Image: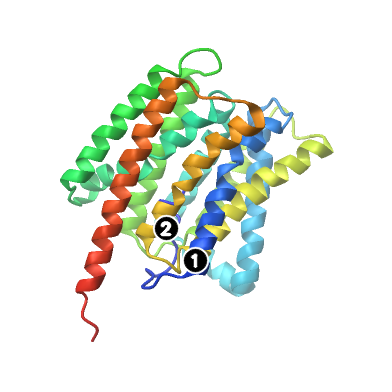
């Protein structure tokens, strides 16, 4: 999720605290699929309702503590149409994630999400005219090849075409959100994520077959919403302000590595060999791209002469 959740002015220095916070956010986000597998609720809309409600309330409390009531109200008032678009995007991806994980292995979902920065680069070229380097084009081609391999090995038992479609939708929606944030760099992500979570909860409440859950499932849903989605966001927006954006994106790839690992350790959900092979190709392309971006950012920073 790290590709669009940058908040505040670009950082000029690297902070150990910032690195630890961003790593913490990646760890928090990584166990979402593993937590969902423990929840004994068979209605996807019920899962979406409770997860997004807990996440929205957590983020609201976070802003109230960080910015105070007046500051929190101002953040929501200043969102504007771009912020509302981001909120709607968060509502969509929060819903798609829960539905996708219920239909397809978690590895498929997170490895599709790994392609977000490269899809964002492609969308930025199409919609706002940002140039794409040769390395980026090569990474895009490699990611598409990796996804093709993954999909070809993920249509057997335990998966579904709809689940893969929802996983792909997450990556495409996130990429579109990234382009919006590049066009409107003043967007604050915490209020947008909070509003998006509450919008998703409201929609889910109208679609769910039931909302009553057992105390055990309610505790797991609290973890799934507040301590997975909400805490991950709070840690990221705090830490990403302290370190360069390219480094934050690199650290965020830890989520893509840990998420399938939790599934293997906790649920014995082992991806197919094609999924593993395609995923390795996707992650290698992403890592190469992000290293290239980090090198460019470092080189640009060294050429700046202090006034």
Q: How many angstroms separate mark 1 from mark 2 (CA)? A: 9 Å
Q: Is residue 15 visible?
A: yes
Residue farthest bottom in this picture: 307
Q: x%, y% of residue 237? A: 50, 61
Q: Secondary structure at mark 2?
A: helix
Disc assigned to residue 248: 2
Relative placement, left or right, of 105 versus 147 is right
Q: x%, y% of residue 134? A: 16, 44
Closest to the observer: 307 or 214? 307
Residue farthest top in this picture: 156
Label located before the other in sequence (1 or 2): 1
Relative placement, left or right, of 235 versus 8 is right
Residue at screen point 52% across, 50% down: 26
Q: Secondary structure at mark 1?
A: helix
Residue 41 versus residue 249 in the image, above or below: above
Q: Residue 288's image quarter?
A: top left
Residue at screen point 56% across, 36% down: 261
Disc assigned to residue 38: none
Q: x%, y% of residue 262? A: 60, 37
Q: Is residue 4 visible?
A: no
Residue at screen point 41% across, 69% down: 14
Q: Which residue is mark 1?
A: 18
Closest to the observer: 174 or 19? 19
Relative placement, left or right, of 263 versus 8 is right
Query: Could you tell me which quadrant the C terminus lies in?
Result: bottom left
Residue 56 versus residue 16 in the image, above or below: above
**Colouring chosen for the image of the structure:** rainbow
User: How many marks overall?
Assistant: 2
């Amino acid at each position: 999720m790290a590709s669009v959740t940058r908040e505040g002015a670009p950082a000029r220095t690297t902070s150990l605290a910032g690195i630890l916070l961003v790593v913490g956010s990646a760890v928090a986000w990584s166990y979402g699929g593993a937590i969902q597998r423990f929840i004994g609720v068979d209605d996807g809309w019920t899962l979406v309702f409770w997860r997004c409600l807990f996440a929205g309330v957590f983020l609201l409390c976070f802003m109230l503590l960080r910015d105070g009531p007046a500051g929190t109200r101002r953040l929501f008032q200043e969102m504007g149409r771009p912020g509302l678009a981001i909120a709607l995007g968060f509502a969509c991806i929060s819903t798609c994630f829960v539905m996708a994980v219920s239909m397809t292995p978690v590895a498929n979902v997170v490895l599709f999400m790994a392609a977000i920065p490269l899809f964002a680069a492609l969308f930025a070229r199409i919609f706002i005219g940002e140039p794409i380097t040769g390395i980026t084009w090569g990474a895009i081609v490699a990611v598409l090849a990796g996804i093709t391999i993954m999909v070809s090995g993920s249509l057997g038992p335990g998966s579904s075409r709809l689940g893969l479609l929802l996983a792909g939708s997450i990556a495409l929606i996130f990429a579109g959100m990234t382009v919006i944030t590049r066009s409107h760099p003043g967007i604050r992500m915490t209020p947008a994520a909070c509003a998006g979570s509450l919008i998703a909860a409201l929609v889910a409440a109208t679609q769910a077959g039931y909302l009553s859950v057992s105390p055990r499932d309610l505790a797991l849903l609290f973890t799934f919403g507040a301590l997975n989605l909400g805490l991950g966001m709070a840690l990221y927006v705090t830490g990403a302000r302290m370190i360069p954006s390219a480094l934050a994106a690199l650290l965020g790839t830890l989520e893509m590595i840990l998420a399938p690992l939790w599934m293997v350790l906790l649920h014995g959900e082992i991806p197919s060999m094609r999924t593993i092979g395609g995923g390795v190709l996707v992650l290698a392309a992403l890592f190469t791209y992000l290293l290239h971006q980090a090198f460019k950012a470092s080189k640009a920073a060294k050429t700046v002469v202090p006034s």
